[in-house]
Amino acid sequence: MTSSLVSRDAGLLVIRLAIGLSLAFLHGIGKVPPAERFIAGVTDMGFPLPVLFAWVAGLSEFVGGLLVAIGLFTRPAAASIAITMAVAAFIRHAGDPLGDRELPIVFLCIALGVLLTGAGAFSVDAWWQQRRTK
């Protein structure tokens, strides 16, 4: 592996750890199980089955964040996070000032980047792929 590939994969690792762990432990952990207030917010957005959608959002942030951090099922986890953050930024906080929507937009953009690039070499996904091809 060349030094530029190592640098790229190390950078992806740093990005995955930063988004995954902060999303899981600063945002997602408090939503699993979803509190009544969170479920009410999902209801106010007009989603059918608000309890189910509240669970999906909370698990997307918590479990999806952990999966992205370790690089396991990275692309599906990042897709789930991106969808959840798009809902947060453009539906839940649609009428809020841009500054209030900034964090979910940043999480959305990073999740899309991880979705497009994958986890990189320093991930469980890469380790698993290496084992399968041997």
Image (cartoon, rainbow, N blue to C red):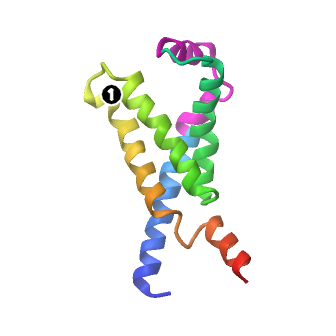
Residue farthest bottom in this picture = 2
Decide which of 7, 55 is in the foreground and name it. 55
Q: Does 84 sit above or below residue 127?
A: above
* Residue 97 as seen in the image, left or right of residue 41: left
On the image, the x and y values in percent for residue 35 come to 63, 18
On the image, the x and y values in percent for residue 124 come to 65, 65
Q: Residue at x 48, y 55 (%)?
A: 115
Residue 43 on the magenta segment: yes
Q: Residue at x 37, y 47 (%)?
A: 109
How many numbered discs? 1
Q: Residues within 10 Å of mark 1 (few under 14, many from 20)?
A: few
Q: Residue at x 66, y 72 (%)?
A: 129
On the image, the x and y values in percent for residue 40 come to 55, 12
Decide which of 129, 10 is in the foreground and name it. 129
Q: Give residue 93's quadrant in the image.
A: top left
On the image, the x and y values in percent for residue 64 come to 60, 45
Q: Which amino acid is tagged 1?
A: Asp
Give the position of the C terminus as an image quadrant.
Answer: bottom right
Which residue position holds label 1? Answer: 100
* Residue 128 as seen in the image, left or right of residue 104: right
Q: Does 131 sit above or below residue 28?
A: below
Q: Residue at x 63, y 56 (%)?
A: 73
Q: Secondary structure at mark 1?
A: helix
Q: Main secondary structure of the magenta part?
A: helix
Q: Does 121 sit above or below residue 76?
A: below
Magenta segment: 26-45
Decide which of 47, 12 is in the foreground and name it. 47
Residue 68 on the magenta segment: no
Q: Give residue 133's quadrant in the image.
A: bottom right
Decide which of 123, 29 is in the foreground and name it. 123
Q: Does 90 sit above or below residue 2?
A: above
